[in-house]
């Protein structure tokens, strides 16, 4: 059954406006903007959400990678185990096993699992403890391996 045009009636005398409405929705969705969740999509893009918003395969490109700075006493480390209560065991690149602490400002933003590569800042008072200041994403870890930062 072919869709009726805008000016035609459906036998009872009502104009067929639903066909016009469905065509408008299809045009909007094909154009790339779905108005049903437009505000939440824009909000995610502005907030920098970690979930992909638009069409794409979700691959990330490395634009800039933060490297550990010696003047700030930073060292690369791998998370060996989770101890609970914002604490982790770190295997640092300088050969020392340290107990790492995730500061409160980073606790909710930085979800850390075993095997993640992080930047640790060893304490000046106790060398066996450190603060976790940065977590690398997978593409950043691959870049660090290519450049020779990770063994």
Image (cartoon, rainbow, N blue to C red):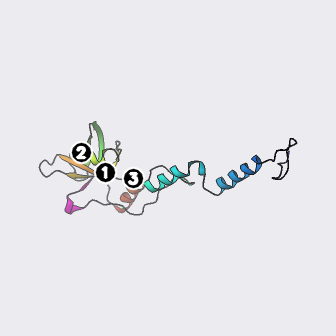
Residue at far front of view: 13
Q: Which residues are magenta?
A: 68-76
Residues tagged 3 and 2 counted as in contact (Cβ below 8 A): no
Location of the N terminus by quadrant is top right
Residue at far left of view: 125
Query: Which circle's residue, 3 or 2, is located before the other in the chain?
Result: 2
Estimate the x, y position of residue 50 in percent, counting from the top left: 44, 50
Instruction: For mark 3, give the secondary structure.
Output: loop
Residues tagged 1 and 2 counted as in contact (Cβ below 8 A): yes
Instruction: For mark 2, give the secondary structure.
Output: strand
- At label 2, counting other C-alpha atoms closer than 10 Å, the crowd grade (few under 14, some 14-19, many 20 or more) is many
Query: Which circle's residue, 3 or 1, is located before the other in the chain?
Result: 1
Estimate the x, y position of residue 51 in percent, counting from the top left: 48, 49
Q: Which mark is residue 144?
A: none
Estimate the x, y position of residue 24 in percent, counting from the top left: 70, 53
Q: Which mark is residue 118?
A: 1
Q: Which mark is residue 137?
A: 3
Instruction: For mark 1, give the secondary structure.
Output: strand
Location of the C terminus by quadrant is bottom left
- At label 3, counting other C-alpha atoms closer than 10 Å, the crowd grade (few under 14, some 14-19, many 20 or more) is some
- Residue drawn at 33 percent across, 60 percent down: 66
- Residue drawn at 60 percent across, 51 percent down: 35
Q: Which mark is residue 100?
A: 2
Gap between marks 3 and 2 measured at Cα: 19 Å
Residues tagged 3 and 1 counted as in contact (Cβ below 8 A): no
Q: Nearer the viewer, residue 83 or 13?
A: 13
> Compared to 78, does 147 lie above or below?
below
Count every numbered label the image shows and give the total: 3
Query: Which circle's residue, 1 or 2, is located before the other in the chain?
Result: 2
Q: Nearer the viewer, residue 77 or 1?
A: 1
């Amino acid at each position: 059954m072919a869709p009726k045009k805008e000016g035609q009636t459906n036998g009872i005398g009502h104009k067929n406006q639903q066909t016009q409405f469905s065509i408008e929705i299809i045009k909007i969705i094909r154009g790339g903007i779905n108005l049903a969740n437009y505000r939440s999509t824009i909000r995610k893009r502005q907030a920098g959400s970690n979930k992909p918003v638009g069409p794409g395969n979700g691959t990330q490109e490395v634009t800039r990678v933060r490297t550990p700075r010696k003047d700030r006493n930073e060292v690369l480390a791998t998370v060996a185990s989770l101890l609970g209560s914002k604490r982790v065991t770190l295997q640092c690149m300088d050969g020392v096993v340290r107990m790492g602490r995730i500061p409160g400002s980073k606790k909710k933003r930085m979800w850390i699992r075993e095997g993640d590569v992080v930047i640790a800042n060893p304490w000046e008072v106790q060398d066996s403890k450190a603060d976790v200041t940065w977590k690398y994403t997978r593409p950043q870890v691959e870049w660090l391996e290519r450049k020779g930062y990770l063994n």
